[in-house]
């Protein structure tokens, strides 16, 4: 049974075993894998009988501003305008530190263009599972959604999705995943100079594989 404890600020669930013949426990390991173990009396040990999620793109594996793709190797990559926060760890397959901007946003420099707008723009990413921790804006159009993000320097990305509407992300994005089929569009905020050098995700993944080989 799933329970939301608003006063305590917790979410939890309880369950009952359907068969007491096989004692079982549920655990979550450090990678975010949720696993069910059953006791095997003959071997005197716990054995894994089920786990979820069954893919490699577990929650937050690529860190802030990293994106996970199970069809690529390595599965984590950094996007145009970003670079690994800890290069040595990243090249060894520890992506938890995520990525940082290569070029600060113009709004952070208080630089305003002649049109009175910050000199930042958006890179369109497609086929994604959208990141966690979005804020929702009601009753706004897709154009207004973009403008709302652009006016707020802490806004780092937005998405306008049919049936949901406007979603914006502040500070950083986490748990972004690329699908081979389907998915949504995410507009990632970048400094204007980075938008002129945008690379495709596949080219970025290739560059990172070459980086790992050199290490």
Image (cartoon, helix red, strand yellow):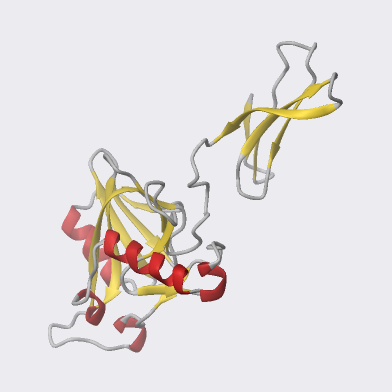
* Left or right, 209 with reference to 59: left
Q: Is residue 54 above or below residue 93?
A: above
The spot of residue 25 in percent (x, y) is 75, 28
Residue 86 visible in rendering: no
**Which residue corresponds to the image point at 39% horizontal and 69% vertical from the top-left?**
210
Location of residue 57 in the rendering, given as x and y in whole percent from the top left corner: 48, 47
Residue drawn at x 51%, y 61% is 63
**Considering only vertical position in the picture, is 184 above or below 12?**
below
Q: Which of 213 and 89 is in front in this view?
A: 213
Q: Residue furthest front?
A: 213
In terms of image quadrants, where is residue 163?
A: top left
Residue extending furthest toward the left: 115
Residue 199: name its quadrant.
bottom left
- As drawn, 81 above or below 163: below
Quadrant location, the N terminus = top right
Q: Foreground residue, 140 or 172?
A: 172
Q: Where is residue 189, by image quadrant?
A: bottom left
Q: Write the residue at 40% across / 62% down.
A: 77
Q: Nearer the viewer, residue 146 or 197?
A: 197
Please state the horizontal and vertical placement of residue 3, each as a whole percent of the image. Answer: 63, 31
45 to 127, vertically: above or below: above
Q: Where is residue 79 in the image (x, y as percent from the top left)?
A: 34, 66
Instruction: Note whether residue 75 is visible.
Output: yes
């Amino acid at each position: 049974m799933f329970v939301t404890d608003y006063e305590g600020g917790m979410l939890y669930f309880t369950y009952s075993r359907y068969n007491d013949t096989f004692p079982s426990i549920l655990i979550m390991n450090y990678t975010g894998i949720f696993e069910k173990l059953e006791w095997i009396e003959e071997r005197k040990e716990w054995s894994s009988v089920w786990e979820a999620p069954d893919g490699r793109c577990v929650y937050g594996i690529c860190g802030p501003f990293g994106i996970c793709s199970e069809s690529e190797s390595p599965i984590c990559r950094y996007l145009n305008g970003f670079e690994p926060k800890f290069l040595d760890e990243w090249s060894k397959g520890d992506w938890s530190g995520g990525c940082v901007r290569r070029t600060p946003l113009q709004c952070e420099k208080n630089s305003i263009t002649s049109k009175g707008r910050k000199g930042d723009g958006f890179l369109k990413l497609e086929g994604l599972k959208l990141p966690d921790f979005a804020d929702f804006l009601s009753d706004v159009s897709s154009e207004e959604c973009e403008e709302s993000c652009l006016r707020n320097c802490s806004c780092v990305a937005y998405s306008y999705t049919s049936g949901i509407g406007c979603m914006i992300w502040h500070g950083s994005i986490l748990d972004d995943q690329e699908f081979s089929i389907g998915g949504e569009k995410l507009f990632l905020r970048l400094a204007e100079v980075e938008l002129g050098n945008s690379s495709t995700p596949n080219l970025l993944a290739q560059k990172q594989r070459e980086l790992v080989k050199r290490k």
